[in-house]
């Protein structure tokens, strides 16, 4: 069932306007995952102090992704924190209520502060519409009112305090943006189980540049100056007088320029004071749409973060801070608390005491003196932190979990994974499928491993004994049959053909729904099984392939790792869902700029065998003209069979390149990804064998995600993937001369490699990431769990 979600945020803005786009980005992510989202926002733009005209609203509407709607709500205009500001909030509250009463009911209402009337409107509408109510707290009211002069003893403070705690009690979930807000709510008696921590972040889509930094600097008038930029609101809480004081103190250094970009009630006063101080080294810039913010930030040399010296702000994590991290520029942090801690931990800048002009001036001078070192550190650490910990995509995972789960936690029954051949930490099964399903369901994974059962990231792993001899594997079938009988799971998900008979019996006896996950053409693989006598392989392929199809017709759904497998199982009437093995977002380091080096690193990751082109890789690299430079071939994975390693080493010795090969063996995913981050070229040269030609090589997608140019086999599907996305070249995988020639061309053409790396990464972000496949997997489960479910093909 598709969820219809309302987000009520008085101050929400689309990327075409200045301001924080937190809720727009969340909504866009949710829409991409199959939800329908409506954002209720004010027609009066709080930052610009003007109404959004109809022409711009129509343009914004045309740019919105499908199933995302903006409901613009009229509210009274205002120019500051006065009576009209209060009436602005009140009119928004009343009109949201009025219009919401006549709108189709959502399943979930999310109401966001800072002001609590939006929360009250959300609660009322959730009661009328019988929807779940989620409250988001971005500022702790009424504590934040104290900053603008409201006394704790006043009637207003007491009314809002009671209203806040009323909404805390009535909400099913409370989203907080900082650990400080969470701690404050817990201290005030709020149930900690209700609270979900979803900090600010940055969408990975914004990490793409649209114009050069030089162009942007020229447009903004930065020239050759060392620019320290503040971007954000110009209000009482931002303490921008301190920035003016610092500008006066660094005025002797003609190389430094201070820029204040944004708008707010204090801007006219700040401009007047700057004129009085005759500050020639300070400029004011108009706000820019959110979509252009990153470009402006990257045009600066250092970024200033400033808030008043107030205990309330010690728990804040302003959205602009994450924009600063994404920009990769050193940060001068004039804020105490959580943000200071992050700046120091991530290693992206230095601290200056809040509301201390002399200390801020000293910090600016320090950044200027150490600019090269600090910029290098910030440009690496900032974007890396965003990708790993603060991408909007990662935050949406948490939000979706809050939306779909009841307060008591996850559904206790739907999914158990059973397999024997694959390790418990198999990338497709554990890192992708199990983790995705664990966001909605309780997942148990029964797989070969060691030790006692454990739970990690929502997945309960129950190890099975690991037998070195395949003839002992049936002992695990007995264990799995017992566990299948005892489990309360509604769905059993099988990943191996040998488990199909077991799944069939469990389905008949215990009325479970069975999913069979097909990774490859099982019958075709029999031709290469060395443990099967050569004379028996054709017969084995026919018998076992037929048995696989017979059992497959009797399961409830098929999950297919490759599109061509759909044709193989065309005679099976049950739902067939293609779930490709694309990489996870945020896991693999993105593209880096390739530079000239004395040692080139060529990488191949996967099973190392003759059919996978290992011999051709070694022979081809021995033919390359390295123009006096050195190289290393990193073979990341297990040799198949193990004795093949000696054969490869003997070959390398004969070619005089024994010291050029590095065998890493099987590595955890995190370590594999580290090898990608400093490699120059990725190889995938599988031979034109039946089971490979129609396959989708997972490692090619990994290389694309890492921004590595690819040299791959010239299979039709692979040509479409690699050359179609201009991320590498396709060659005859058994023609070592052609392989060598293409490697040589790429390795000596840095610009081409950089372009291919960026093209591959862009294609990964837009088309070939796990998020697109995750939605299909979750949809399949949702359909199977509905009464009479299981009748869709995708």
Image: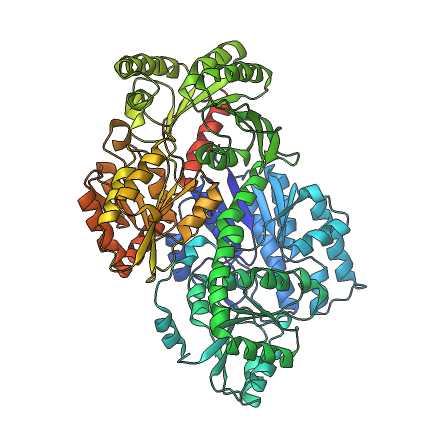
User: Quadrant of the image for the C terminus?
Assistant: top left
Q: Nearer the viewer, residue 456 or 422?
A: 422
Left or right: 548 in relation to 173? left
> What's the residue at 44%, 59% (across, down)?
15
- Residue closest to the far right: 153
Q: Is residue 19 visible?
A: no
220 relative to 750, above or below: below
Q: Nearer the viewer, residue 475 or 588?
A: 475
> What's the residue at 42%, 58% (across, down)?
207
- Residue closest to the far top: 509
Q: Nearer the viewer, residue 151 or 446?
A: 446
Give the image's coloring scheme.
rainbow
256 relative to 539, above or below: below
Residue 273, percent from left and from top: 58, 85
Left or right: 544 in relation to 335? left
Residue 720, percent from left and from top: 24, 42
Residue 5, percent from left and from top: 52, 42
Residue 129: name its quadrant.
top right
> What's the residue at 55%, 38% (across, down)?
107
Residue 79: name its quadrant.
bottom right
Residue 622, percent from left and from top: 25, 48
Count of marks placed on residues: 0
Q: Nearer the viewer, residue 579 or 172?
A: 579
Q: Is residue 394 visible?
A: yes
Left or right: 271 in relation to 300? right
């Amino acid at each position: 069932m598709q969820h219809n979600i309302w987000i009520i945020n008085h101050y929400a803005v689309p990327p075409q306007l200045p301001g924080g786009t937190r809720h727009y980005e969340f909504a866009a992510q949710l829409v991409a995952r199959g939800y329908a989202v409506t954002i209720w926002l004010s027609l009066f733009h709080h930052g610009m102090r003007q109404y959004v005209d109809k022409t711009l609203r129509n343009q914004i509407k045309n740019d919105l992704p499908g199933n995302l709607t903006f409901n613009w709500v009229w509210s009274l205009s205002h120019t500051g924190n006065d009576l009209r500001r209060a009436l602005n909030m009140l009119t928004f509250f009343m009109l949201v209520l009025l219009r919401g009463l006549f709108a189709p009911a959502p399943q979930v209402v999310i109401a966001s502060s800072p002001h609590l009337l939006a929360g009250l409107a959300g609660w009322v509408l959730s009661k009328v519409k019988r929807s779940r109510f989620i409250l988001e707290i971005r500022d702790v009211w009424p504590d934040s009112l104290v900053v603008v002069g409201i006394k704790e003893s006043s009637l207003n403070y007491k009314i809002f305090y009671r209203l806040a705690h009323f909404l805390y009690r009535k909400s099913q979930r409370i989203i907080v943006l900082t650990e400080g807000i969470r701690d404050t709510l817990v201290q005030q008696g709020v149930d900690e189980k209700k609270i979900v921590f979803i900090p600010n972040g940055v969408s990975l889509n914004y990490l793409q540049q649209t114009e050069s930094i030089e162009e942007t600097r020229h447009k903004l008038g930065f020239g050759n100056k060392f620019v320290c930029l503040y971007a954000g609101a110009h209000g009482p809480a931002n303490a921008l007088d301190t920035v003016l004081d610092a500008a006066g103190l660094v005025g002797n250094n003609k190389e430094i320029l201070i820029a204040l970009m944004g708008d707010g009630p204090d801007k006219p006063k700040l401009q007047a004071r700057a004129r009085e101080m005759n500050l020639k080294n300070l400029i004011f810039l108009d706000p820019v749409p959110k979509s252009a913010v990153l470009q402006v930030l990257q045009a600066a040399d250092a970024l200033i973060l400033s808030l008043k010296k107030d205990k309330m702000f010690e728990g804040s994590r302003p959205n602009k801070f994450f924009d600063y991290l994404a920009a990769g520029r050193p940060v001068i942090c004039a804020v105490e608390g959580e943000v200071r801690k992050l700046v120091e931990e991530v290693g992206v800048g230095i601290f200056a005491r809040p509301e201390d002009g002399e200390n801020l001036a000293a910090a600016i001078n320090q950044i200027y003196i150490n600019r090269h070192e600090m910029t290098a550190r910030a440009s690496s650490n900032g974007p890396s932190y965003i990708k790993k910990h603060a991408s909007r995509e990662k935050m949406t995972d948490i939000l979706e979990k809050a939306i779909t789960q009841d307060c008591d936690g996850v559904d206790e029954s739907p999914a158990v994974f059973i397999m024997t051949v694959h390790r418990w930490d198999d990338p497709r099964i554990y890192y992708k499928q199990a983790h995705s399903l664990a966001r909605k369901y309780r997942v148990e994974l029964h797989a070969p491993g060691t030790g006692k059962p454990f739970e990690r990231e929502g997945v309960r792993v129950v190890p099975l004994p690991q037998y070195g001899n395949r003839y002992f594997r049936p002992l695990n079938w007995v264990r799995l049959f017992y566990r299948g009988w005892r489990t309360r799971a509604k769905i059993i998900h099988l990943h191996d053909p040998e488990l199909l008979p077991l799944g069939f019996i469990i389905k008949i006896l215990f009325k479970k729904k069975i999913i069979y996950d097909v990774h490859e053409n099982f019958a075709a693989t029999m031709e290469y099984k060395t443990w099967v006598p050569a004379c028996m392989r054709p017969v084995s392929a026919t018998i076992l392939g037929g048995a696989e199809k017979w059992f497959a017709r009797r399961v409830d759904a098929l999950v297919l790792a490759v599109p061509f497998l759909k044709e193989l199982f065309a005679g099976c009437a049950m739902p067939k869902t293609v779930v490709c093995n694309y990489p996870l977002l945020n896991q693999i380091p993105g593209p880096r700029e390739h530079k000239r080096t004395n040692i080139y690193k060529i990488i191949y990751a996967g099973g190392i065998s003759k059919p996978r082109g290992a011999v051709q890789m070694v022979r081809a690299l021995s033919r390359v003209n390295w123009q006096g430079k050195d190289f290393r071939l990193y073979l990341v994975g297990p040799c198949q069979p193990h004795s093949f390693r000696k054969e490869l080493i003997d070959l390398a010795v004969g070619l005089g390149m024994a010291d050029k090969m590095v065998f890493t063996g099987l590595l955890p995913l995190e370590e594999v990804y580290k090898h990608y981050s400093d490699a120059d070229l990725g190889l995938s040269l599988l031979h034109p064998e039946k089971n490979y030609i129609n396959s989708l090589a997972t490692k090619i997608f990994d290389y694309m995600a890492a921004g590595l140019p690819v040299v791959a086999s010239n299979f039709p599907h692979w040509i479409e993937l690699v050359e179609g996305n201009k991320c590498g070249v396709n060659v005859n995988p058994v023609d070592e001369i052609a392989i060598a020639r293409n490697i040589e061309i790429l390795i000596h053409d840095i610009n081409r490699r950089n372009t291919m790396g960026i093209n591959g990464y862009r294609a990964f972000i837009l088309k070939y990431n796990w998020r697109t496949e995750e939605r299909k997997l979750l949809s399949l489960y949702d359909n199977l769990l509905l009464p009479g479910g299981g009748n869709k093909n995708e």
